[in-house]
Image (cartoon, grey):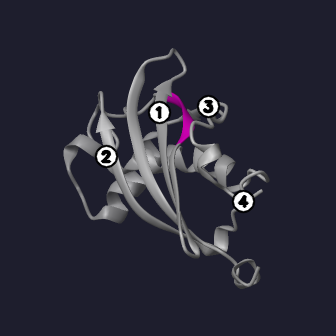
Amino acid sequence: MPISTEHVGRSYPATERYVVSRAKVRELATALGDDSEAFRGAAPIAPPTFAIVVAGHAWEQMFNDPDLGLALERIVHGEQGFEWTRPLRVGDEVTATLTIEKVRTRGPVDWIGSSATISTTDGEEVCRVSATFVHSHAAEEEQR
């Protein structure tokens, strides 16, 4: 069965533990062209968009869920947002838990709203990443 409103509320298990490392924080800051001491100093924090690295592992669970019938090659990342409790810090050990928040189908397109909660392995919520994905149906699906 393809994705539908029946899938709203579906949550996936927490991802494997991800350790925020100094090297990864520096790599992203460099890629962003940001030489701020906040990302490179003695007690660095991660740039805000670093949360996408962790959320991406949770999104994979949804993309690979056979019940949803999603095809990654037909998905576009439409929008994203962040709600922060505190910054990610080097040394944080975190996981992400994804929930499908909304599904709308309009013609040949599914609009999928999701929310990934990033928490430390001790249970402290750090960030919530919301994302909307646009999934187009295969041509053969439209002919049915």
Mark 3 touches mark 2? (CB < 8 Å):
no
Is disc 3 placed on a helix, strand or loop? loop
Q: Earlier in the sequence, mark 3 or mark 2?
A: 3
* Nearest-to-viewer mark from 2 and 1: 1
Question: What whole-number distance in Å separates the C-alpha atoms at marks 4 and 3?
Answer: 30 Å
Q: Which residue is mark 3?
A: 17
Q: Is residue 76 visible?
A: yes
* CA–CA distance in space, label 2 to label 1: 13 Å
Q: Are marks 1 and 4 in contact (CB under 8 Å)?
A: no
Quadrant containing the C terminus in the rendered view: bottom right
Upstream in sequence: badge 1 or badge 4: 4
Q: Earlier in the sequence, mark 2 or mark 1?
A: 2
Task: Provide the secondary structure element on which disc 1 rests.
Answer: strand
Disc 2 secondary structure class:
helix
Residue type at mark 3 is Arg
- Please tell me whether the stretch drawn in magenta is mainly helix, strand or loop: strand
